[in-house]
Image (cartoon, helix red, strand yellow):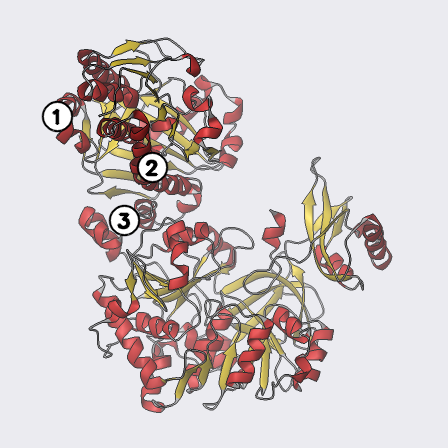
Amino acid sequence: MANLKKVEIVGGGPGGLYAGILLRRMFPDVQVRVTDVSPRGVTWGFGVVFSDRALDFLKADDAETHDLIAPRMERWEDMTLNHPDGAVALDGVGFAAIGRLELLTILQARAEAEGVELVFDTFIDDIDALEADLIIGADGLNSVVRNASPDAFGVTVSNMTNRFAWFGTKRSFDTLTQSFVRHPKGALNAHHYRYAPDMSTFIVEIEEDAFFAHGFDKMDEEQSAAYCEELFAEVLEGAPLVLNKSVWRQFPRLWCENWTYKNRALIGDAVHTAHFSIGSGTRLAMEDAIALVTSVKEAETVDAGLAAYQASRVSVAKKIVSAANTSCEWYETFSERMEARPLDFGMSYITRSGRIPRDRLRQIAPKFMEAYEALRPEITDPVSNDVPAAKAIGFDKAQHPNCSSILWDNLDRNPNARALTGPAGDVTYAELIDQAGRWGNAFKAAGLVQGDRIAFFLEDTPVYPAAFFGAVRAGFVPVLLNTMTPPDILNYYLEDSAAPFALTEAGLVERFSEAKSRVPLVVVNGEAPAGTQSADDFLAGYGPDLPVATTGPDDMAFWMYSSGTTGRPKGIVHLHHDMAYSQQSFAQSVLKLTAGDVCFSVPKIYFAYGFGNAFTFPFSVGACTLLMPGRPTPEAVVDTVEAYKPSVFYGLPTLYTAICNMPGVETRDLSSLRQCMSAAEILSEDVFKRWQALTGLPPIEGLGSTEMLHVYLSNTAEEQRLGSAGKAVPGYEIELRDGDGNRVGSGVDGVMYVRGGSSAPIYWNRPDKTAETMREDWIYTGDRFIEQDGFYYFQGRADDLIKVSGQWVWPLEVERCLNEHPDVHECAVLAHELEDRRMTLRAVVSLRAGAGDDGQTKALQDYVKGKLQPFKYPRIMEYVESLPKTGTGKIDRQALKR
């Protein structure tokens, strides 16, 4: 046991007081003093909330303190979410609360009974002047102990953008409740719970833009309280809000890498903060106190005890703090989440920290989960069988109740033909269907229910089609995720999709750990780390016979996510008949594959373009897919073509350009190719002709979208127009409309609308974005085109026009002009708002050679002035080595705006 004679505790909150109690219990001879800046009987805030059973940690080791606190607490077994469209009860989500002042009074009396000296209304401004064997900083966010040596403690702190104000109210609520309110100026949320029979805490939270829109920044405490009483009138039922330092704050995320320094140790908010939404701040502080005092008691010296405290406590607390941070991030966009239906909103809420798997939720909240899982998604295909384009190709979606038939039909047609080839070896259709059946049966045995989403974080290997088709045949919904996704966005995908399960490559497991997700992971193509399951173990014991689930053509089949170049990525839902529609339209009219083709899609399967190229089209006719995992560098792509001899090649403009620029490419063997496809953007004339000279094949260019699943505009081998996206693919209708929604004629610029049977019906949980894009049975693309002789020529985005010097300018026109300059390799031209709110143009340029300087800037600006009208030149010129790209090869304009 360490030799302790005197301990100074700075901060008289629950953590500091409990540290004093423990010290006197474990070291009866030690002198302990707790000094607090507030007068006795004065505190900030109202109630303190604990999650269900959170005081159990006291019961075993300190029954006396537990028994003093527990009877004074208000308790409830359920939680309520008041969504604007209906309340949601979360059964089994219990909490308990007590008034903060009452808790402090109990702990103060207990501390004094143990012989702790309590000093109030005293600010310690010189920590170095304290004489003690141990100094404990329990003084909260603005800790003077920590701030005396911030570098030594390794402090990191950042603020969330939301604002919150902590009120009380003289109204008792039945459960811990959150009330979400819609308002034209921005949504608000109130966290409220009773902590005494006649009093409740009432925390109002609001997103940053809404905070300023409502004018809270110009109100004092009394004005804010009065306005909040008006906004939450239905919730408060006439009860007034009570003030106690109820100013607007931003929640600080604070973490210290080092919890000790010299003879000093930090606990509670002095060393870490945990967002109030998980009710763990006070508990964490008291558990920190237990860990600290126990570590010192069990060590031979104070220094050894502090080292043991750091070693044992940090990892435990970090898990809870990480979950609190993830929960906190959920609230940063709660207004968007409010657009979901109440039960979907409740599911998003209860899974927000990523700590509770679906099977555990069924145990914790059985009534809620029963209601949630019985809720059929409100998805209606807006495009009927009777639209002209569907009738023209003879499509009947009733014939396609489950998209797994695209693969399974090959069992009778050509079971021994190659379905897959590539570095992983050849796989026949019979073998692939056998593997898919095993995956489907394993998913069913994993406790999933029909309609559950499964996150696919996979490379292009044979596992992908096997797991995908097994999942959809069993009635589950694969969510295809870009393997370049960073942890924060991955966490968003898992939360947004409510996927209770995920498949991942062995080399990508760490991404889930960083994302703080807690979904069960099945690991493919490598060793499964601890806490995950290998694919071999997951599949063990399951046979290949998989009956098809009772799905219909309009049921959810799979999701993809938008790239997020214009904001938060959107979950794009596709239905079971969509794959067959894209096959009957684009593939039969343009591709015209045969069973002897070998198809090589460089764009990955998680892209809609790559998905059709690698799955839908070859499997529909019994052809072979060449799968190449890993990064598709130009060299790797050409090596793969030479090694596996594909006949049909799918690329993107950036890839065609890169291959054409490869040293020595003219000596490489590309002779196996008979057809080359390109999509996403229009090839330059130079690259088009260079590729044609290299292979003897002109790239067949088209344009599609994830919302339409594949290409709906395309040139053909028989008819091509350079610079055009092509004609409408049979099965799709195209209309160009003006700003008033009226159709425009040939040669007139208009916004493109598309209609076809593969159209996504909704963006998941985004009715606002759904309404913007899915306009009745048409998709609003936001792209401007001109039609000439049935061919469509891209003109830019509908929302691209800006006013510069009082005159309208189209940034894409300026961008195209700059791209024609011989010194420019590529560029992007963006709207830019100056400090005085005027708009101008900003050009981000990658030069062919040399660095950008004032002379180069003037030359490029003069070039634009000479080619276009003088006012259109970009005032701001920036030079970069290369422009950022999205996964589909497009310039990432959102990244350039950051």
User: Amino acid under label 3?
Assistant: Ile
User: Amino acid under label 2?
Assistant: Val
Secondary structure of the residue carrying numbered label 2 = helix
Q: Locate residue 725: give its quadrant.
A: bottom right
Q: Is residue 36 left or right of residue 608?
A: left
Q: Is residue 286 left or right of residue 504?
A: left
User: Amino acid under label 1?
Assistant: Ala
Q: Nearer the viewer, residue 11 or 772?
A: 11
**Label placed on residue 769:** none
Q: Residues within 10 Å of mark 1 (few under 14, many from 20)?
A: few
- If the image is split into quadrants, where does the N terminus sit? top left
Q: Residue furthest front?
A: 300
- Is residue 740 visible to us here? yes
**Mark 2–mark 1 CB contact (< 8 Å):** no
The image shows residue 750, relative to residue 310, as above or below, that is: below
Q: Which residue is mark 2?
A: 314
Q: Residue at the location (49% across, 85% down)?
A: 598
Foreground: disc 2 or disc 1:
2
The first of marks 2 and 1 along the sequence is 1
Q: CA distance from mark 1 to mark 3?
A: 30 Å
Q: Nearer the viewer, residue 763 or 94?
A: 94
The image shows residue 35, relative to residue 253, as above or below, that is: above
Q: Position of residue 167 (x, y in %)?
A: 36, 23
Q: Position of residue 20 (x, y in %)?
A: 25, 18
Q: Residues within 10 Å of mark 2 (few under 14, many from 20)?
A: some
Q: CA distance from mark 2 to mark 3?
A: 22 Å
Q: How many marks?
A: 3
Q: Residues within 10 Å of mark 3 (few under 14, many from 20)?
A: some
Q: Position of residue 280 (x, y in %)?
A: 29, 33
Q: Which residue is mark 3?
A: 356
The first of marks 2 and 3 along the sequence is 2
Secondary structure of the residue carrying numbered label 1 = helix
